[in-house]
Amino acid sequence: MNHKPKTNQTLLQHARSMRRQPTTAEQVLWRRLRRSQLGSYKFRRQQPLGQYIVDFYCHQTRLIIEIDGDVHAHQETYDAERTAWLEANGYRVVRFSNMDVIKNTDGVLQMILTLCDEAVGL
């Protein structure tokens, strides 16, 4: 039998809290990703994976979307270690700035759709 590892309850509670208080950029993107609106790909938000919580995750394509605000300028080492762990575990991580998402939403969505299509071989 293949059992899914149990998610750390503290991490899960933190993810739920983050879902209730999204950033503006996360709200903008989520409005366009939710309910499989983008190429019928299903996304989850504030998804625990391993010891991390990722902003958006598409299980079908193993694509992780991270929206970086100002805080990320001060945590480059942490972000690099986190990305390395995620990629080593078979995920693809793509990052967009808050400004990209807010000012160029359609361009960001097109890039995400292209990455999803590539992952499934379209």
Image: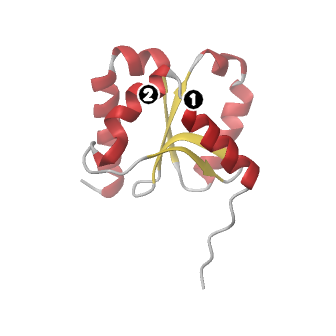
Q: Is residue 73 above or below residue 40?
A: above
User: Answer yes or no: do the residues labelled 1 and 2 have beta carbons within 8 Å?
Assistant: no
Q: Residue at x 29, y 56 (%)?
A: 121
Q: Is residue 93 visible?
A: yes
Residue 111 drawn at (x, y percent): 33, 33
Residue identifier under label 2:
27
Residue 79 drawn at (x, y percent): 67, 32
Give the Cα separation between the discs numbered 1 and 2: 9 Å
Amino acid, disc 2: Gln
As rendered, which of 98 and 110 lies closer to the eye?
98
How many residues crowd mark 1 within 10 Å: few (<14), some (14–19), many (20+)?
few
In the figure, is residue 83 to the left or right of 22? right
Quarter of the figure with the N terminus: bottom right
Q: Is residue 84 above or below residue 49?
A: above
- Residue 116's label in the rendered image is none
Q: Residue at x 30, y 48 (%)?
A: 36
Residue 26 drawn at (x, y percent): 47, 28
Residue 75 drawn at (x, y percent): 72, 24
How many residues crowd mark 2 within 10 Å: few (<14), some (14–19), many (20+)?
some
As helix, strand or loop, the secondary structure at mark 2 comes to helix
Q: Nearer the observer, disc 1 or disc 2?
A: 1
As rendered, which of 118 and 97 lies closer to the eye?
97
Amino acid, disc 1: Gln
Here the colouring is secondary structure
Residue identifier under label 1:
21
